[in-house]
Amino acid sequence: MKPDLYVTQVTLTISIVTYSAALRMEKGDPRMVSKLDPKIYTAHETPCIKQLARLGQARVRDMQVVASVLPFRVDNYVIEQLLDWSAAPDDAIFRLVFPSREMLDGASFARMAYLHDGAIGDAQQAAAAIRARLNLHPADQLNLHRRSSAGFRTRSDATRPVDAHWAGQN
């Protein structure tokens, strides 16, 4: 596809979506309010999410503790339109979006909860130390997806040591 044709198609698509959104807004579609006026919630704003009140203060506190280590961000469209709050915390989207206590091991959670509750100490430094210990690549992506002269390594190459692979001893 030619680049200028692609740009024209993208521009046309954006125009159609914008026109469609304007029509919905004229008709008073309540879904359009959150799409056009996004509100972002981070770890510090979790108490502002009204729907979390039905889960209890303990769970909200646990979410804040975990969110002080792991990134957390959600917008009002997810909260208002996508989540089934009657099924929370077992709702699939809720489990994907909101942090839970199980995301940290017991000792790390206890340390961050202690600091979160006002203990003297550097919570940011402790969070950085916990993040450094986490296994960010549990499926060994760093070793399996290294670029070589022949292309990317595949799972069948996984039995070869990375050093031998890079030394050209395939």
Image (cartoon, helix red, strand yellow):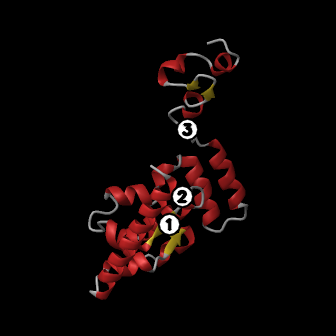
Q: Is residue 117 left or right of residue 77?
A: right
Q: Tag 1 or tag 2, which sits nearer the N-term? A: 1
Q: Is residue 33 left or right of residue 29?
A: right
Residue lying at 50% horizontally and 66% vertically, measured from the top left: 61
Residue 50 visible at all? no
Q: Is residue 66 left or right of residue 20?
A: right
Label 3 Cα crowd, 10 Å radius (few <14 / some 14-19 / many 20+): few
> Residue 29 appears at what percent x and percent y?
28, 82
How far separated are the C-alphas under marks 3 and 1?
Answer: 27 Å
Q: Which mark is residue 66?
A: 2
How far separated are the C-alphas under marks 2 and 1?
Answer: 9 Å
Q: Tag 2 or tag 3, which sits nearer the N-term? A: 2
Residue lying at 26% horizontally and 68% vertically, measured from the top left: 86
Which is in the foreground here, disc 3 or disc 1?
A: 3
Do the residues bearing badges 2 and 1 touch, measured as CB atoms within 8 Å?
Answer: no
Residue 132 drawn above or below residue 161: below
Q: Residue 168: which quarter of the image?
A: top right
Say how many tags the image has: 3
Three-letter code for the amino acid on which mark 3 is drawn: His
Residue 144 visible at all? yes
**Residue identified by numbered label 3:** 137
Q: Tag 1 or tag 3, which sits nearer the N-term? A: 1
**Residue identified by numbered label 1:** 61
> Residue 68 appears at what percent x and percent y?
59, 61
Q: Secondary structure at mark 3?
A: loop
> Residue 128 appears at what percent x and percent y?
68, 52
